[in-house]
Amino acid sequence: MENAKEKHEHYGHRKRLRNLIDMAGFDALSEVQVVEQILTMTHARCDTNVIAHKLLNEFGSLSKILDADAYDLMQIDGVGEVTAKTITYLPQIFDLYLKDKNSKKYNFKTYKDIYNFFKPIFDMYACECVVVGFISNNNTFSGYKKLADGELCEVKINKVEFSRSIMRNKAKAVMIAHNHPFGKANPSSKDYDANEKLAIILENLGIVMVDNIIIGEDGLFSFKNNILFPKNDL
């Protein structure tokens, strides 16, 4: 008698996915297959393909699933509290990974180095946000912190927490960066105004601002030099 398990269309599917990842990496997987693999962390035996399709149909993409609120994720049939919270933890884990990998003695000498430090950080976030890189001796990034989501002109700095972050990272100076995720790096008039206000805040805190940069689809803009460095040159 044929085993009922063998009748299931997805029998052996997880093993095939693992073999594909082992041979070619996650780049070889489709978006729905990546979501399936994530779901296997909290679904020991059930078919995660159906749930993965439901999540993608509702949220539209992998990044939007990972950025979603746990409550919204739990509205999908098959996604319980543990699964929802596990999904929301992943971007935070990725963020810690980048901090550990990129912030340990990452030396910069050129704007290409600066671009290569901040670009992976901004790739973690679908929206516009502001990040501060802490600089120790010898032009080395000792860490970074996302100040807030939103445009540079909207960000309000908590001076006490900001100062504590600098001390924790033993920073001698900082570099401010924000992204234009769906546009060019050229600053607006509001960006220029925000840059001046930010410089005053940091000066009052006794902190050197090495530069304030914008990373966009076309490259990197430096407020210090008032120039755009094209993406092809970075």
Image (tube, grey):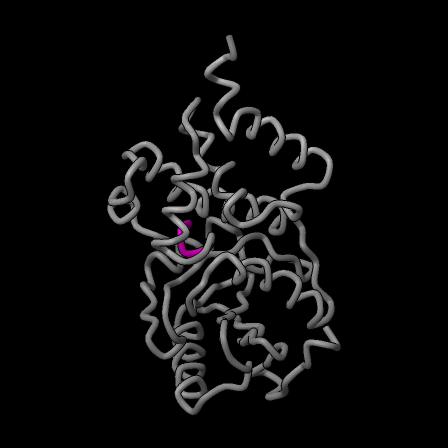
Q: Which residues are magenta?
A: 63-67
Q: Main secondary structure of the magenta part?
A: helix
Residue at coordinates 43% horizontally, 43% vertically from top-left? Answer: 52
Measuring from the top left, give residue 63's x and y in whole percent. 46, 55
Q: Against 162, is 207 above or below?
A: below
Question: In the rendered view of the protein, which quadrant contains the C terminus?
Answer: bottom right
Q: Is residue 115 left or right of residue 65?
A: right
Does the magenta run of residues contain 84? Answer: no
Q: Nearer the viewer, residue 136 or 78?
A: 78
Farthest residue, direction front: 1
Q: Is residue 172 left or right of residue 156?
A: right
Residue 204: image x %, image y %? 39, 73
Hey, which quadrant is residue 190 in on the image? Answer: bottom left
Q: Quadrant location of residue 110?
A: bottom right
Residue occupying image coordinates x 63% and y 60%: 117
Q: Is residue 76 left or right of residue 61?
A: left
Residue closer to the observer: 231 or 96: 231
Toward the viewer: 111 or 203? 111
Q: How many marks?
A: 0
